[in-house]
């Protein structure tokens, strides 16, 4: 004889079970467990199997919702990182192109200088190698390692240039900036001198062409006697430094004069256009008066 529905529902509601939320040892009635899950009490009439399935579905639904929420957060975070990486790569590329353009412009300029040979762009340890050429167009030793800098010179740049020159077995090295604004006090005081067995010249693009003419006899002497040629001729070394200093000052003044000349030319053109305009306005009036 079957159990009455009312008795059955009361029995099921009052059945005890382990808490499915905390896996504790305490026992709860099925109705209390369902209350904790936010399930309506009407489901307390379900069988134990149906109740467990409902609780599992409820838990998995919450789990899936949380997983989706966290996945979306991670996707957004990944998207933000990707955007930041793109921006960083863009800025680095601009910086790289800027430095590369300065190097390429330098090489193109040196190629126009008679009597001077320049290598292709070096992949490492320096930017270029330059050398004087003999009458037949062949480059002469010793060759000179060149490092081109777009902005200010730093101590680490000098140290690296010296190490690169030693690695390439070059007794002379030149670091070139756009202009003297990139020089520190130490660079002005040591524009040309020996450091760890390497003669280093700190210069700018506008000065270098004339300075190579000044240094040619020195390089010829080094070709014959090595760096001892200058080491044993202190007076000559000091005279070279004074000459380079004077040349830099002359080149600076020439640069100022060129800027002034350019500015004067622009002003002259401006006033010439202004006077021409005044003449054009005046001439028709005179012709009108003569006709009357």
Image (spheres, helix red, strand yellow):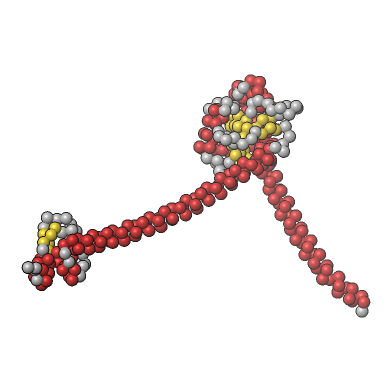
Q: Residue furthest bottom?
A: 292
**Image quadrant occupied by the N terminus:** bottom left
User: Dividing the picture into quarters, in which one does residue 14 lie?
Assistant: bottom left
| Vertical relation: 72 (above or below) 204 | below
| Vertical relation: 201 (above or below) 52 | above
User: Dividing the picture into quarters, in which one does residue 173 lie?
Assistant: top right
Position of 3 compared to 163: left or right?
left
Relative depth, front residue between 182 and 122 = 122
What x and y, as percent, mark residue 24? 14, 55
Q: Residue furthest top?
A: 225
| Vertical relation: 156 (above or below) 25 | above
Q: Residue furthest front?
A: 1
**Image quadrant occupied by the C terminus:** bottom right
Q: Residue at x 53, y 51 (%)?
A: 90
Position of 38 compared to 239: left or right?
left
What x and y, as percent, mark residue 156? 50, 37
Number of callouts in the render?
0
What x and y, as percent, mark residue 290? 92, 75
Query: In the rendered image, is residue 128 in sight?
Result: yes
User: Dividing the picture into quarters, in which one does residue 18 lie?
Assistant: bottom left
Q: Residue at x 56, y 38 (%)?
A: 187
What x and y, as percent, mark residue 133? 71, 29
Position of 159 compared to 268: left or right?
left
Position of 218 compared to 149: left or right?
right
């Amino acid at each position: 004889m079957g159990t009455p529905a009312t008795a059955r529902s009361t029995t099921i509601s009052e059945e005890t079970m382990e808490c499915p939320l905390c896996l504790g040892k305490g026992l709860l009635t099925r109705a209390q467990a369902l209350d904790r899950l936010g399930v309506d009490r009407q489901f307390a009439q379900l069988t134990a199997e149906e109740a467990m399935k409902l609780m599992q579905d409820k838990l998995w639904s919450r789990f899936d919702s949380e997983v989706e929420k966290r996945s979306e957060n991670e996707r957004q975070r990944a998207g933000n990182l990707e955007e930041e990486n793109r921006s960083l790569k863009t800025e680095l590329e601009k910086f790289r192109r800027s430095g590369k353009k300065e190097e390429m412009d330098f090489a193109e300029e040196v190629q126009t200088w008679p009597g001077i040979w320049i290598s292709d762009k070096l992949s490492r340890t320096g930017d270029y190698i330059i050398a004087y050429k003999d009458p037949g167009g062949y480059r002469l030793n010793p060759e000179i390692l060149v490092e081109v800098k777009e902005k200010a010179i730093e101590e680490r740049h000098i140290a690296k240039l010296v190490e690169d020159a030693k690695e390439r077995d070059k007794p002379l090295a030149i670091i070139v900036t756009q202009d003297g604004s990139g020089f520190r006090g130490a660079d002005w005081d040591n524009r040309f001198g020996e450091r760890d067995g390497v003669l280093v010249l700190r210069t700018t693009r506008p000065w270098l062409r004339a300075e190579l003419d000044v240094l040619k006899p020195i390089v010829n002497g080094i070709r014959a006697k090595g760096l001892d040629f200058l080491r044993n001729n202190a007076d000559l070394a000091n005279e070279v430094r004074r000459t380079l200093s004077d040349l830099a000052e002359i080149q600076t003044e020439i640069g100022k004069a060129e800027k002034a000349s350019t500015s004067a030319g622009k002003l002259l053109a401006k006033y010439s256009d202004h006077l021409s305009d005044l003449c054009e306005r005046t001439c028709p009036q005179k012709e009108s008066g003569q006709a009357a």
